[in-house]
Image: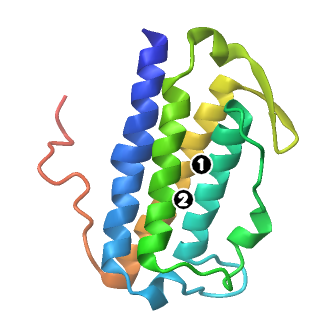
Amino acid sequence: MLLSIIKNEYHRRIIEEGLARITYCLSKLSEEEIWYRNNANCNSIGNIIMHLEGNVRQYIFAGIGVHKDIRTRDMEFDNKNRLDYKALLEKLSNTLHDSYEIINNLSIENLTENRKVQGFNETVMSIIIHVIEHFSYHVGQITFYTKSTKDIDTKYYDGLDLNAT
């Protein structure tokens, strides 16, 4: 039961919500807006998406799965490594769907196993929690940028009664 909940929440938070929201936001932004930086201490939306893809790949593929850690974190923040909108979204989408397959193949016993990621000792469960919260954090940044740049309501909760008890 617990494992099923974890798998469902990963899919819901990362793919159904996160990827859908990123896709929506990117559809509203121009290539210039996707790669715009306010200043040297801010990242572009494109860099944030590259960062999310790298983080999921490192934590899920290498941390939980059996894949080699090939992440070059600094390159995620280099504006010279730009991908166009479609390629950026396709790379992220493929990584997220593949990461779900890794999560979906876990057993309940795997959740308490220790793994090393970015030099930290973590359990598989803590890796999953990290990825979900980290992903959500950056989806919020992407949403804020899109709303403030385009002066739009994203309507993420359109048609839902958020005051229901």
Judged from the image, the secondary structure of the residue bearing numbered disc 2 is helix
Percent from the top left, x then y, of residue 111?
A: 64, 17
Q: Tell me the distance, in whole angstroms, between the alpha carbons under discs 2 and 1.
A: 7 Å
Q: Which residue lies furthest to the right in this view?
A: 119
Q: Is residue 100 above or below residue 38?
A: above
User: Can I make out residue 93 in this image?
Assistant: yes
Residue 138 is labelled as 2
Residue at point 35%, 58% (across, down): 21
Judged from the image, the secondary structure of the residue bearing numbered disc 1 is helix
Q: Which amino acid does label 1 sit on?
A: His
Residue at point 19%, 40% (across, down): 163
Q: Residue furthest left?
A: 159
Q: Is residue 85 left or right of residue 157?
A: right
Q: In this view, does 1 lie to the left or right of 58?
A: left
Residue at point 15%, 45% (across, down): 160
Q: Mark 1 points at which residue?
A: 134
Picture colour scheme: rainbow
Splitting the image into 4 quarters, where does residue 126 fall? top right
Q: Which amino acid does label 2 sit on?
A: His
Splitting the image into 4 quarters, where does residue 78 fall? bottom right
- Report the quarter where the N terminus lies: top left
Asked whether the beta carbons under mark 2 and mark 1 sit within 8 Å of each other, the answer is: yes
Percent from the top left, x then y, of residue 59?
A: 68, 41
Residue at point 64%, 39% (across, down): 60
Percent from the top left, x then y, of residue 124?
A: 67, 25
Q: In this view, does 138 lie to the left or right of 73?
A: left
User: Can I make out residue 136 in this image?
Assistant: no
Mark 2 crowd level (few <14, some 14–19, many ≥20, 10 Å Cα) = some
